[in-house]
Image (cartoon, rainbow, N blue to C red):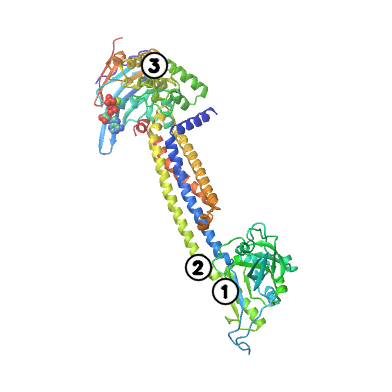
Amino acid sequence: MNWPLKKKNNGDGNSNGHIIEMLGITKVYDTGKIQVEALKGIDLVVDKGEFVAVVGPSGSGKSTLLNLVGCLDTPSGGTYMLGGEAVAGLDRDQLADVRNRRVGFVFQNFNLLPQLTALENVEMPMLFGGMGRRERRRRAKEHLDRVGLGDRVEHRPTELSGGQMQRVAIARALAMEPDIVLADEPTGNLDTGSGSDVMSLMTELWGQGRTLVVVTHDKTLASRAGRVVEIRDGVVVTDERAVA
Amino acid sequence: MTSFGSFLRQLVRDVWSQKLRTFLTVFGIIWGTVAVALLLAVGEGVHRRQTKSFAGLGDRIVIAWPSRTSLPFEGLGKGRRIRVDETDIEFLKKRVGGLAEISSEYAQNLRATFGDRARLVDVSGVSPIFGEMRNMVPAEGGRFINPTDMDQRRRVVFVGNELAEDLFGEIDPVGEKVMLQGSPFLVIGVLQAKEQDSSYSGRDHSKMIIPSSTFQALTGQRYVDLFIYKAATPDRNKALTERVLAALGERKRFDPGDTQALGIWDTTDMFVWFDTFMLAFKLFMGFMGILTLTVGGIGVSNIMNVVVEERTREIGIKMALGAKSRTVLSQFLLETFIFTAIGGIIGLTLTWGFCAAVAGTPAEDAIGTPVLSPQIALLTAGVLGLVGFLAGYFPARQASRLDPVVAMKL
Ligand SMILES: Nc1ncnc2c1ncn2[C@@H]1O[C@H](COP(=O)(O)OP(=O)(O)OP(=O)(O)O)[C@@H](O)[C@H]1O
Ligand SMILES: [Mg+2]
């Protein structure tokens, strides 16, 4: 097992610069008869400003891990510190706040609300964050502009291509200006062209100093990351940093 | 408040975007409300109609007709004729406790003419109170005999509705003059058509009613053919009759136990059976109502369950974006509340409209006028609303307590 090196990239903020710190994380899915042990003790430390690509075969536990990082799910065991704070100690409302302010999540299947326009989808996290209507509109437009969808604000998800939907999802993830962006196979459903657009967006975000954890099968995308973590059968098998 | 505004806007958007689902939910509540409210309204209508036609003869009155004695009494032989006149009626009024209403009735077959039409008509002379006791309601534009008519022996007549048609045809009888035994009588009112299941001397719709004072002056008849009376409440009629028999027996000298001297027909007896029947009917309708309500409730709760199931993913996504459980829940609850309110209001309006539509159609003769009781209506809408609310609330609360990923995968 490779222990991640405790080297700071451009980390500051927390005492030790670790924005994500997982120790012995396990996840067991209990489906009645069978218990699936999806994660069997994951240790993962990510510093502020890192770009981590998580790779591995299908069913190895990548999505499970990412969901736990994003506080969308509860681990079965182990400790998880997010920004120096134990996630297990947070109540439901505090968790909602973490999801709202600290983490932006990009799902593999977009998870846009079909009844809302692109603009309203992007507004959604700001709505839950208690932001005023004007400010929300302005910011949502800005974010859609940034992902190149300034002319599609009134479109509904069904009226958009896969790549456009993914870009709306990215704009939504960035709406609250989170310091961590998590993406689960953001290019998985896209053709090469849209895929490379999304990839450049990711790289750009990294350049802005955000922390990125991206699950991907895409070798090109993984190669752009500063660090590649490989998972097999619920454990980390390799953890390599690219030589900068 | 911006956030409440956004909240509402979002709600409207969510609801509007799912027109079919919204429609089904509201429709379910409408359907349930209409089914229950209409059933009970029709039941109440039938009940009232039955009661009314059953009381066509009068509501729980006692009819007494003086006849001949069948028992010897204090040395007097049997077969003696008992005669009652107006002074005896006054005597009963004064001496018998608990006598709420009493009216004498004189009856004869008299010749009535209007223009070139002449008929032999049952004419009754009665007191003003008779109208109320015997359920003789004047049709619009007319009235029954009043105390002044009585005191001044006015020649005024109240005409049965069928007789009025026969005699006057197209002409409105009120205000017309009709000849009775050669004297002109002013028509003051026509009987409003009524159901009458039973009678003692022909149906009211073919009679003429005049003040008893006028009747006596016209015919010279001194003794009553019969008199009717009632106690303040029906359950006291039996005891009242005993006192009437005792008082009249003493005055007219006959055995109070003589069943022939004064013939008695206490119509309360028929009502005993009738009331039992109506109670059974009401219980039946109540049972059907509860059954329908249950079925409606199950329907509404199923719809609500489907709605929550469909929306669990949406709830999951919203929570993944940082929505707090109570935000998600309160939107859901407000939605349910609005659906229920709209459904209930539409349902009750439809039921009310149906009730109004039946009034005045031939159907009314068969089932009576359905009566929508506001309490029942509100109860129905309330119960269905509560069922829908609970059916939606618990699964929604459960969904809002899941981890976002779990909700999104359901
Ligand atoms: N909700 C669930 N209930 C039961 N088992 C689950 C559930 N979600 C995932 N699993 C199991 O956990 C294991 C890890 O799943 P996960 O989705 O994390 O894999 P993955 O690495 O993301 O795969 P892929 O590359 O195909 O997306 C799999 O064996 C899967 O069957
Ligand atoms: Mg996956």
Q: Chain ID for label 3?
A: A
Q: Which structural element holds mark 2?
A: helix
Q: Is residue B13 above or below residue B185?
A: above
Residue type at tag 3: Arg
Q: Is residue B105 above or below residue A119?
A: below
From where the camera sits, is residue B367 visible? yes
Residue type at tag 1: Trp
Q: Which structural element holds mark 1?
A: strand
Circles 1, 2 touching at the beta carbon (< 8 Å): no
Q: Position of residue B196 (x, y in %)?
A: 56, 65
Residue in the picture at 53% in, 45% down = B349
Q: CA distance from mark 2 to mark 3?
A: 88 Å
Q: Position of residue B143 (x, y in %)?
A: 67, 61
Q: CA distance from mark 1 to mark 2?
A: 15 Å
* Quarter of the figure with the N terminus of chain B: top right
| Towards the viewer: B404 or B173 | B173
Q: Do callouts 1 and 3 point to residues on the same chain? A: no
Q: Is residue A139 left or right of residue A24?
A: right
**What label does residue B265 carry, if any?**
1
* Residue carrying label 3: A210
| Towards the viewer: A225 or B84 | B84
Q: Position of residue B154 (x, y in %)?
A: 73, 67
Q: Which structural element holds mark 3?
A: loop
| Towards the viewer: B209 or A232 | B209
Q: Residues within 10 Å of mark 1 (few under 14, many from 20)?
A: some
Q: Position of residue A38 (x, y in %)?
A: 27, 29
Residue type at tag 2: Trp
